[in-house]
Amino acid sequence: MEIPAIVGAGLVVIGAGFGIGRIGGSAMDAIARQPEATSKIQTAMIIAAALIEGIGFAALFAV
Amino acid sequence: MRRKYSLLALLFTLTISGVTFAHDNHSHSDDHSEVHHVEKDTRTEIKETIAHHLKDSHSFELFHGVSFPLPIILWDDGLHVFMSSAFHHGEAVAESNGNYYFMDHGKIYSTDPEGTLVYDDHHHALNDKPLDLSITKNVFVVMLMCLLLFFLFTALSKSYRKGPIPSGFGRLLEPLVLFIRDDIAIPNIGEKHYKKYMSYLLTVFFFIWFMNLAGMTPLGINVTGNIAVTFALALITYFITQFTANKNYWGHIFWMPGVPVPMKIVLMPIELLGTIIKPFSLMIRLYANITAGHVVLMALIGLVYMAGNVLASGAFYGLTLFLGLIELLVAFLQAYIFTMLTALYFGAAVEEHHDEH
């Protein structure tokens, strides 16, 4: 029931969610501009999302 | 045709339900008779069940009450080999060639015939521990899966004798192998050097994928959620990167070209640390993703039993189903990410000199 830990975990999730949301948003803009590059954009989006998720999880576990 | 599809959909739903139902073994025994005043006990019991399922164990428990023992191999000035049934699930003292051993919280300690353990303030036993090389559940599953992978891939390679198009199970594996070669290895490593790394990339991808999938089965297996396993994978990646790197790679780390000299001196320790941190992040990413997935799934199943009414339990059950499907995607995705980042690091290690600097 440590409050600082809970607040820290919440901040980490906010940061990760914000970051991945931005990536998703730019990916969707890019796909809308050029639908034939969809698979490349999707691949890059998944990779970036996994990297951010990685640090998010690492921080969450440390907390 | 429509009947076949609906039958298939029903079968699929039942299978996935089996995945969610089979995670809980112990928690439902208390909840049906007592109601709200033992809420605390259910919660601690659920926590203990989750912790138990995340850990390795010396016997393989298939489901509640049915388990088979695995061999225990200890090195204590001499090799001691016996089956884990000698411990009777942590209650009996095992004897082997004159030495007595007792298992406390999954760890084996040497003790006397009565099984006395000296505890310290934090309830950790202070006895000597022999070197534990036993075949635990994780080791057993790794060996089983490696055998499965071996048979699958030898079937694929044998089917190439009959012609360029594979037959049998190889038809499922061939697009995956080509996917790794064309979308992971060649773009990241380049046409000249990708062949020597292909075997490791294939091994890592299929190993992690199959281990993640095994973790989603009802057998309570948790191989990639064990930090020792992911540490070993990251260590091998680190060694391969360092030992196959060319002069350009080391040049970029120790004396980065195209940068003023004070910056070069500042950059050197950072780059050196970077070589260690990159495989470290590989280890943490895989471990945390898989463990978090298992914890969330098991906690949701615990919530199914902790909720008061049937409607909430049904909602939690549906959520567990949905999350289970996402975890299947995560199993593939984490294998792909690990392999792709490994290929990226290999590519950086064998990069040729560019004339931009």
Image (cartoon, coloured by chain):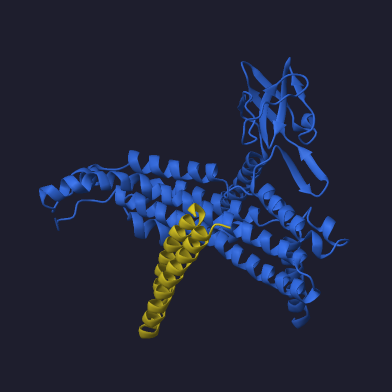
Vertical relation: B278 (above or below) B58: below
Vertical relation: B76 (above or below) A1: above
User: B283 or B89: nearer the eye?
Assistant: B89
- Residue visible at 37% across and 57% down in the picture: B186
Vertical relation: B4 (above or below) B86: below
Q: In the visual, does B24 lie left or right of B249? A: right
Vertical relation: B65 (above or below) B16: above
User: B139 or A62: nearer the eye?
Assistant: A62
Q: Quadrant of residue B255?
A: top left
- Residue visible at 55% across and 49% down in the picture: B207
The furthest residue to the bottom? A32
Q: Quadrant of residue B3?
A: bottom right
Give x and y (percent) for residue B314: 76, 73
Q: Quadrant of residue B299?
A: bottom right
Chain B as rendered: colour: blue
- Residue visible at 81% across and 58% down in the picture: B28
Give x and y (percent) for residue B352: 23, 51
Give x and y (percent) for residue A47: 42, 64
Chain A as rendered: colour: yellow
- Residue visible at 27% across and 51% down in the picture: B351
